[in-house]
Amino acid sequence: MGQTQANQTAFIVDDQADSQYAADLLRAQGWLVLSGAGVSSTASMAIPPKSRRVVLGHGNGSSLALACAGNQKPVKWLWVGMPNPPTNARIYLYSCYSAPTLAQALKGNAVVGHHDEVPIPDDDIRDVAIRYFSRIRAIMGSSGRMTSVGLLHEIRLAASELVKQCYGSTSSEIFMAALDISRTLYP
């Protein structure tokens, strides 16, 4: 039996210009990417129960903003205390300052986020981004129930492996991008 869009790992990407490269890069891998009008302005509709979502947006600690559903400017999309938040989903908030407050507020989900800035994928870190998100996609799509702690453990392993692979790279930007991803993870 095939996967439906609801239970398939999908990347939800902010529709602003600074995130467009990331959306195009992920689509070029043949991965499911939801962006712009393809993303409901209601987070619980875009992240239904049992779904697996990687969200690339802009966080500020207590909320995450996305330009989606025809909005040209980002609007608060996930936030602490929101009515009807997503439930029973596996969510990776690849967004600056999406943890600990926001990640912890999304109780009833397996959620991991970052407590500091994360690099927005661009041409300079293209290969690192593909390797990392390829591993993240496999983790998110794995079968079985996973708690936030289990999800964090698996993502931390992927991030530390990325750092090891990039150590000694000819580009300090590539190594620093991998290090920033790893050091900022938080359940």
Image (cartoon, rainbow, N blue to C red):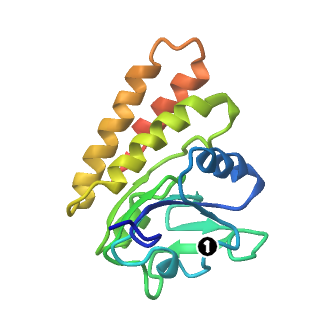
Disc 1: which residue:
39
Between 145 and 179, the one lying in front of the other is: 145
Residue 53 visible somewhere in the drawing: no
Residue lying farthest to the front in this orientation? 1
Q: Position of residue 111 (x, y in %)?
A: 35, 62
Q: In the displayed structure, would residue 41 be above or below residue 68?
A: below
To which quarter of the image does residue 34 belong? bottom right
Determine whether, in the image, residue 149 is placed left or right of residue 4.
left
The residue positioned 43% from the left and 73% from the top of the image is 6
Determine whether, in the image, residue 47 is placed left or right of residue 29.
left
Residue 37 visible somewhere in the drawing: yes
Determine whether, in the image, residue 139 is placed left or right of residue 178.
left
Say how many tags the image has: 1
Q: In the displayed structure, would residue 28 be above or below residue 92?
A: above
Quarter that holds the C terminus: bottom left
Between 91 and 141, the one lying in front of the other is: 141
Q: Amino acid at mark 1?
A: Val
Quarter that holds the N terminus: bottom left
The residue positioned 49% from the left and 61% from the top of the image is 10
Q: In the displayed structure, would residue 171 be above or below residue 91?
A: above
